[in-house]
Amino acid sequence: MASFYYVTLNKELKKSIYAKALSPEQLKDVYARIKQNKDKQKKVIKIVMLCIIIMSILMDVVTFQNRHDPELFVFMLLLTIPLIVIICALVYFSQIGIITIQFNKAIEKSYPELASELKL
C-alpha cells in the first residue's frame, strides 16, 4: 500500500502557539526557521517541477518522432499538461501549503497583533 508524505506543524509547537505559551521573540524565531525551511523547500520543488516538465516534454517529442502522428502528439500534450499541473500542485501543497496554513491560522487566532508581521 502506498503512503502520501506531507509536512505539518509540530504538534507541541502548535499547542504552544494556541496556548500563547511563546513570547513574541520566540515566535519570531519559530517564524524565521519555518520561513527559511519554506524557502529551501520552494527551491527544491521548483527543481523537481522543472525535471518533471522536461521529462514529459521529452517523452512527448520521442513519441512524436517514433510515430510521426501530429494528432497523437497533441493528444499526449493535452494529457500530460493537466497531469503535470495536478502533480505539481499536490507536491507544493503537501510540502509547503499545509504547514503555512496551520502556522498562519494559529498566529491569527492566538496572536492577532503579530499576524500581519508573521504571516508566511
Image (cartoon, grey):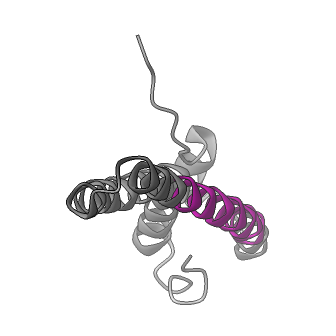
Name the side, left or right, on which 97 lies relative to 38.
left
Q: Can residue 93 be seen in this view?
A: no
Residue 101 x/y as whole percent: 43, 63
Q: Residue at x 56, y 48 (%)?
A: 9
Magenta stretch contains residue 36: yes
Q: Nearer the viewer, residue 65 or 28?
A: 65
Q: Is residue 75 visible?
A: yes
Q: Residue 27, located in which quarter of the rendered image? A: bottom right
Q: How many labels does the image show?
A: 0
Residue 70 x/y as whole percent: 27, 64
Instruction: Name the residue at the top extreme.
Output: 1
Magenta stretch contains residue 59: no
Residue 118 x/y as whole percent: 60, 80
Q: Residue at x 54, y 49 (%)?
A: 14
Q: Residue 119, located in which quarter of the rendered image? A: bottom right
Point out the stretch of residues depicted in magenta: 31-55
Name the side, left or right, on which 67 lies relative to 11.
left
Q: Residue at x 71, y 70 (%)?
A: 39
Q: Which of 113 and 28 is in front in this view?
A: 28
Quadrant placement of the C terminus: bottom right
Q: Residue 60, located in which quarter of the rendered image? A: bottom left
39 is higher (above) or lower (below) than 71: below
Residue 13 x/y as whole percent: 63, 48
Q: Which of 6 and 85 is in front in this view?
A: 85
Q: Is the magenta stretch mostly helix, strand or loop?
A: helix
Quadrant placement of the N terminus: top left
